[in-house]
Amino acid sequence: MKTLILGAGYAGLAVATKLKPTPGMQVTMLERYPYHVFWTRLHEAAAHNTKVTLPLAPLLKGTGVDMQNLTVDAVDLDRKEVTTREGQTFTYDTLVVGLGSVTNFYRIPGLAENATELKDLTDAEDIFSFVQRAYDASYTGNRDIVVGGAGLTGVELVTELAQRNEILSKERGLPPFGISLVEAGPKILPVLDDALRAKAQATLDSYGIQTLVGHRLMQATAESVTVQTADGQSRVIGAGKIIWTGGIQARDIIKGEKLQKGPGNRVVVDATLRVPEYPEVFVIGDMGLGLNQDGKPVPTTAQHAGQQGRLTGKNLMRLAMGEELEVYEPNTLGEFISLGGLMAVGWMKLPWNQKLAMTGGLAHVMKRASEWRWRSSIS
């Protein structure tokens, strides 16, 4: 059984590290980088240049997976072919697609051309470089930063930037730059309850971050954004750096005449995470539209991508041995949001569907614990 795994993000790497050499299985992973990125910590790299990668080769030892550093360009399910940007073509008997998501700019004029994303290491490096330049005595441009989108990524990013801002302001003797967080919806962090959201908002306020909820970003230029309130009032906000974290959509890289896609361009999958019309194909992570026990889409989070990957790794070995596949039962263990330094807010799941809310240092510890659980699962 010739198997291809596309991508070494949380989903793809979980598949590969779950595998063991199995008779009849020949597994190849295609990944453009020789390292795995902790995508959930990119905000730390953007603000502090923190290292957020692990080399892949040591993680794949003993799995029987052959990794090739190539960039996937197209996936043709009808021809059962995968082509790469480097010009190579791969065929497969079984395929696992875990290529993640791209930024959704919602066709806002000028946004894609003028905003920095936070989807890759190069994005984090670009943001870090701007912050460093903004504190160079010779810098004469606008130093302020506008971040669009007050979900998890946006809030974690602005709080880390605010902390870095304070440090550099004291070190260089220059006034801090302004940080604005723009959100079209009525509140920040909609995944949290009101009490935790209030704690997060208080932290944003303590950093001096200007939070603009109910402000839809309408247009972006190289030097400003235009926002509009619910009552139709417009406002222009100047910025030296515009960052957009306001939405994602699955990569539009898979083609197939019978393929079904849902919201966010996600591929519809069955209970075993296979494409019903192409049962030899598993689609996991941000790209797959799996359903939870209530029939609602599984969130596009790292913890769910890891769960899907580990199950798919087991199912590949079952498939090779002619055994019945297990179904996916998502389990949300909790959600923790970093707010800079040792501050965080969030909740963890307790028995009988109860939740335990946490703030401050304890929440920070739980946030870090989730990363260490991930590290141990791929070691």
Image (tube, rainbow, N blue to C red):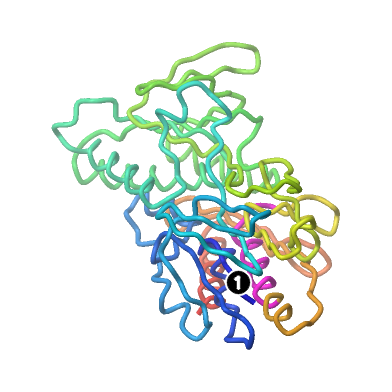
Q: Secondary structure at mark 1?
A: strand
- Examine the rendered structure and indicate whether residue 50 appears above or below residue 196: below
Relative placement, left or right, of 205 versus 95 is left
Query: For residue 312: magenta?
Result: yes
At which x and y percent is residue 248?
Answer: 58, 42
Query: 169 or 331, which lies in front?
Result: 331
Residue at position x 50%, y 44% from top?
203
- Find disc 1 in the rendering and name its residue: 3
Q: Quadrant of residue 277?
A: bottom right
Q: Amino acid at mark 1?
A: Thr
Residue at position x 52%, y 82% from top?
64
Query: 163 or 317, which lies in front?
Result: 317
Residue at position x 35%, y 58% from top?
50
At which x and y percent is residue 44?
Answer: 40, 54
Residue at position x 68%, y 71% from top?
312
Q: Quadrant of residue 288?
A: bottom right
Q: Main secondary structure of the magenta part?
A: helix
CA neighbours of label 1 inside 10 A, class few (<14), some (14 to 19), many (20+): many
- Examine the rendered structure and indicate whether residue 115 appears above or below residue 248: above
Magenta range: 299-314
